[in-house]
Image: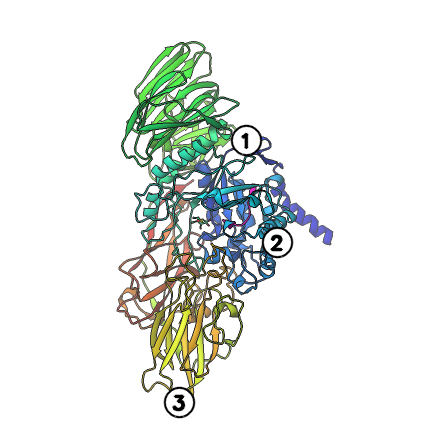
Amino acid sequence: MLLAMLLTCAALVAPARAAAAREVTYDRYSLMVDGRRVVLQAAEFHYFRLPSPRLWRDVLEKFKAAGFNAVSLYFSWAYHSPKSGVYDFTGVRDVDRLLRMASEAGLYVIARPGPYINAESSGGGLPAWVKTVPGRARSSESGYQAAYREWLHHINPIIARHQITGGGPVILYNAENEYQVNTDAAYMQDIQDQARADGIDVPITTNDCCDGGSWSSTWATGPGAVQIPGIDDYPQSFECANPGLWGPWGEGLTERLRDDIPVFAAEYQAGAIDVGNAGYDKCRELTGPAFMKYFYKNNLVTTGATMFSYYMGYGGTNWGWLAQPNDVYTSYDYGAPITEARRLTPKYDEFKRQGYFLQAVTPLAKTDPLAAPPVDNPALTTVARANPDTGTQFVLVKHADRAATSTDAATLDWAGHRVPVQVKGRDAHVLVAGYDLGAQRLTLSTSELMTHAAIGGRDVAVLYGTSGSPGATILRYGSEPRVTVLDGRVTSTYSGGDLRLDYTHEGLARVLVTGGGRRPLLLLIGTDAEAASFWRTDTASGPVLVRGTDLVRAASVNDGTVRLTADVAAAGEVEVFAPPAAHRLRIGADDVRVTRTSSGSLLGSTRPPGPAPLPALTGWRAHAESPEAQPGFDDSRWTVADRTTTTSPHPPKTLPVLYADDYGYHYGNVWYRGHFTATGAETTIDLNAVTGLRGNYLVWLNGRYLGSAAGGVQADSGDQWTPPNPDPGPGHFAIPSGLLKPGADNVIAVLVANMGHNDDWIADDLRFKQPRGLVGASAGGTPISWRIQGAAGVDPVRGGLNNGGLYGERTGWHLPTYPDKSWKPANPAATPLPPGVTWYRTSFRLDLPANQDVPVGLRFGGEPSPAYLVQIFLNGWNVGQYGGDIGPQREFSVPAGLLNEHGTNTLALAVTAEQPVPAGPGPISLFAYGNVRVD
Ligand code: IPT
C-alpha cells in the first residue's frame, strides 16, 4: 500500500522532471548553461504582492515578452509562516506552482529565500513571531538559528526540485540580502550549508549593498563567501517628487568583485519606493526610459556586466499587513515597467528594445574593454568593448558630461569608416560592428540593433534610432547586391565590398537586399516607437516577428497558419513576419483577413475589445462597532497580559509587559482592556504605544471616549540610523470629573493600530524587535490587570497577514457570507462618524466579458480626513488602507481572483475614527485600469 502511494507520488512529480537536466557554470565573463553563454536579464517579482496565482502567469509572460530571460523571486518567510512550526504553501502561497509557471513561461529563476529579504515588507520578510525568539536576528545566535533553519528546510526543498540541474528553471540561489551590514560569517555560511544539505546545487549568489568596498577579503574567500556576489545599485535615488534628478547616487556602474566571476548587477534600479508620497507616476518618471537608456547601457558597455536583475519588473500590492510601514503604503507599484494593475508602460518598451538586443546578439556575453573609436565633437564620448573570439565590437556613444541636455552630433571614425552619430541629452546608444548577423556580415551600424532572426530563408533585422537622427548601416558583400527600398527614404552606395545605407530615422523604412553572395536580408529601420511595436517569439518552426498588437505572448506556425496569443487594446494593424508557407493568421479564435506585403509579411487588422462597463456602488449599509469600549463587555476569554519578562531588547516602560507580539498577536489592530479598582485619587490615564508610522491608538474609560494619540514609530527622525525612541508614543488622558468609580471596577479600553513591523536592514535587531501595542500604562500608580485580544486565529485561505483584532474582523463582518440585512442603509460619504470603529458594506455584481483583461480598481473621491483610517476588504481580502495620513493613494487595485469577475462581490470598509468627523470616506466607485482582448 505504502509502496503504491509512493509510486503514485513519484508519477505526479515526474512531469516537472521531464525536461533535461542542465549544468550551470561560469567564468569571468558570464554564466553558461551546458557550456552556452547566457546574458542573464532578470526582473524582480513578488508573488506575495499579487495574491492571485493565475495572474502570476500574466506577469511572467509579460516579462518574457519584454526580452527578459529570468525572473528574480524573493520568497517571504513571513508570508508562509504565521507562527513557529506552521508553514503554508497552498493557494496564494503555492510557490511550487509559481516555479512551474516560470518554467512554462520560459524564464530562469533567481531564487531569493532570504531568510531576510527587506523589500519594504513587514519585518523585512522575517515573521513577527521571530521577534519573540531569543537571539539576535540575522545572526548565528541559537534561537534565531533554529527559527531560520526551520524556514530554510521548508522552502529549500521546493526550490531544489525546480533547479535547472533537474530540468527546472532555478539557475541561481541568493543567500540573505545586503548582509554586508553585519559580519557574522558563520550565519552566511550556515545559510549556504543548509541550502546544500537541502539539495541546492546551483551557484549561490548574494546581493551586496551599494558598493563593493564593503566586501572584506574574508567575505570574498573565507567562511560565508558565496560563489557569485553581486551589487545592488539605485543611482537615481528614491526622490520621486523630483523626477528630473540625474544620478544623485552615482554613475551606477556595477563593480567587478572578483576575477573569476561575471559582473553581477544583483539589484539594479528599475523603479522606486515613494518615500516622499509623490505618487508612483513620478517614480516611473524618475526611473523612466531616459534613465534606462543612459544608465543601463552605460553600465553594460563600461563594466561588461552580463548578469542583471532589475528591481522591480512588477511591484504589486502591499495587501493585508504586508507593508513595512516606514517607507511604503498599500500600493507597491514601484513605478515599475509593468504597473500594479499589470499595464505596460513606456519603460516596458525600453526594456523590450534593450532586452531583445541582449538576447539576439550573443557575442555580448563575452567581452573585454577595447580602445574606443573617436568622435570629433568633445560634447560626446565613446566607450568600447569587443568579443575576443568573434571580434564583434560594442561602442557606447554618450555625452561627455552625463548631465548634458543638448542634442549633439559628431562623426565617428570607426572600422575604417566615417559615420554620423547624434545623441540627445540624457540618452546613449550601443552600436555594433563586426558582427555575423545571421548569414550577413554587419560592418557597422549607427542605428541600434534591436533583434534579428532568420525567417523563411532570409535574415530580418530590426534597427532603430532617435526620431529625426541620421543613421548609417554598412554591410559586407562578395559582389554588389541588389538594394530595394520598399518603404521610406534610404540611399545606398556600394564600394570595395561595402554596401552603405544612409537614412534619417523616421517612421519605419524597409530595405530588401538580395544577391551579393548571401541569402536575402530585410532591414526594418525605425524610430524608437516603431521598434517598440515589434514582438519576437520563438516557435517550433523558427522565430516569428510581429508588428502591432499590444502584447504577443506566444505564436505557432502550422499548416500554413500563424497563430498568435496576443493582447489587443484597440483596433490597428498587425503584421507578421513568418515563413512564406504561412498564409493565414489567427489571433486567438479570430481568423484575421490578411494580404501579403511587398516585405513578404502578412498584414491585417486587429479587433478591438468590447466595452466593459462597471456598476455603480450603491446600497451601502452601516453598523457601529467597538463594543469592547463598553465597561460591561465580556473579556473573560481574552488573553491575560501578565508577563513580567520579554525577549525584546526594548525594556517595557511599565509592567506587566503588554507587547502584542509576546501574546501571539502579530498583525493589525489589538484591543486591550485594563481593570482597576480606583482609589479616587487617579487624575490621568498615562499610556504609551508603538504602532509604526501612520498609526494611532484610541482610549476609553468606563465607556467614555477620552481621545487618541499618535503611536510610536521606528525613530524620531524616521531614518534607519537613529535609535528607537525610548518614549515612543506617549498619550496622557485626563479623567473627566464624575467618570471614575472609586472602590469599584473601572475599565480602560485601548484600541492600538499595528501598521506593520520595522525591517532589519542594518541588522541591529533593535528596529526589527521594536514592540507593537502598549509599552507603558498607568492610572496614577493604581494596579491594573490587563487582557489583550488581537486577530482571532489565522484565516486559512487569506493567511495571517490579512486580519487584525477588530471586533468586526473577529466576527466575520469582512466576509462575503456575513448577514448584514439588519444594518442601516447609509452612504459612507454623507454620514457623520463618531470616534471608534464603523463598518460599511455593500455588494455588486460583475459579468466582465470573457477573453478580456479588465483590471478593476476602487476609487475614493473627495479628500480623506486625517482623522480616520479605512481598512478595505473585498470578498474578505484586506486589499488596503486608505486615509488622510496614509499616503497619496486614492485608487486601490483589486486583482481578478480576489475579485469575482462573473458574480457577486462584497465590499466592506472598517473605518476607525479618532475624533468625530462630518463625513466618512467617499464617494467610492469602481473603475477599469484598462481593457484588452486577451486571445
Ligand atoms: C534594496 C533591498 O535589497 C530591496 O529589498 C529593497 O528594499 C530595495 O532596496 C528598495 O526598494 S536596499 C538598497 C536600496 C540599499
Residue 427 found in image quarter: top left
Q: Secondary structure at mark 1?
A: strand
Q: Secondary structure at mark 3?
A: loop
Q: Which residue is mark 3?
A: 742
Q: Amino acid at mark 3?
A: Pro
Q: Earlier in the sequence, mark 3 or mark 1?
A: 1
Task: Report the coloring of the rendering.
Answer: rainbow
- Boundaries of the magenta span: 171-179
**Where does residue 379 sit, x and y in percent of width and height?**
30, 28
Is residue 310 something that shows in the picture?
yes
Q: Which residue is mark 1?
A: 37
Q: Earlier in the sequence, mark 2 or mark 3?
A: 2
Q: Nearer the viewer, residue 104 or 931?
A: 104
Q: Which residue is mark 2?
A: 153
**Where does residue 243 sit, x and y in percent of width and height?**
31, 45
How far apart marks 1 and 2 lie (CA) works out to 32 Å
